[in-house]
Amino acid sequence: MIKKLLSISAFLICILNFNSASADYPDYLGGDRNYLLSGGHMGVGWYVVRDSVRVEVFDPPIYIISGKIVAVYDADRGNTEIHNSETRRYLYNSMSEKMFAIGDEDCYYIYPVGAMASTGHEFSGEMFFYIAYHAKFYGGKQWWDEIENRYRDVNFSDHLYEIVEDEA
């Protein structure tokens, strides 16, 4: 009984620590609602610059949207200094329900589900689409995970959309 209680306690401590660690990335860089948290991993926070998002192609079912992303090291510890920034471009095909990142010399498919190592967790593409159209691209439904052979929710929570909507 004591072993079981200790195991449950250790499990709860791990979960609480994980949840508090993931919540340490501020939704808005330095409180500026133009810089929207699109992801965080190992201390690095990635922020979409809201006013940089531009629709380049609107030709349904094809859409191309670009925008600026900034990276902040130690964002989970309160740092607000921008380390670097880059412009990203995404292609969306609403007929095939696929999103692609467009690079200088290549284009690659962004999986809606899966481990970070295989998907890269490109949440900024979803955020760009939501900023431009106030519509979810991958969000709001489940997707087939080829590795786990089951349907799963997307790699991000609806909080991503709440950050965009909260302009107060």
Image (cartoon, helix red, strand yellow):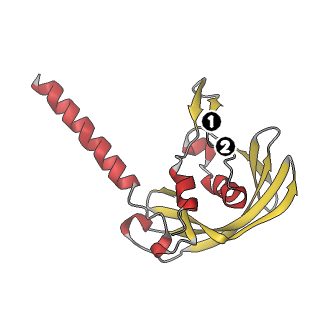
Apparent side of residue 83 relative to residue 99 in the rendered image (left or right): left
Element carrying mark 2: loop
Query: Is 93 situated above or below 148?
Result: below
Distance between the alpha carbons at the discs numbered 2 and 1? 7 Å
Residue denoted by label 2: 138
- At a point 76% along the width and 42% down the height, the residue shown is 98
Crowd rating for badge 2 (residues with CA inside 10 Å; few <14, some 14–19, many 20+): many
* Residue 137 vs residue 7, the one in the foreground: 137
How far from the left and from the top, in percent, is residue 1? 11, 22
Return the residue found at the far front.
168
Query: Is 167 situated above or below 60?
Result: below
Q: Amino acid at mark 1?
A: Lys
Return the residue found at the far left.
2
How far from the left and from the top, in percent, is residue 67? 70, 67
How far from the left and from the top, in percent, is residue 85? 62, 72
Query: Is 83 situated above or below 59?
Result: below
Quadrant hosting residue 145: top right
Q: Amino acid at mark 2?
A: Tyr
Do the residues under discs 2 and 1 have CB atoms within 8 angstroms? yes
Return the residue found at the far right.
59
Residue 154 is tagged as none
Element carrying mark 1: loop
Residue denoted by label 1: 141
How far from the left and from the top, in percent, is residue 36? 55, 65
Quadrant hosting residue 53: bottom right
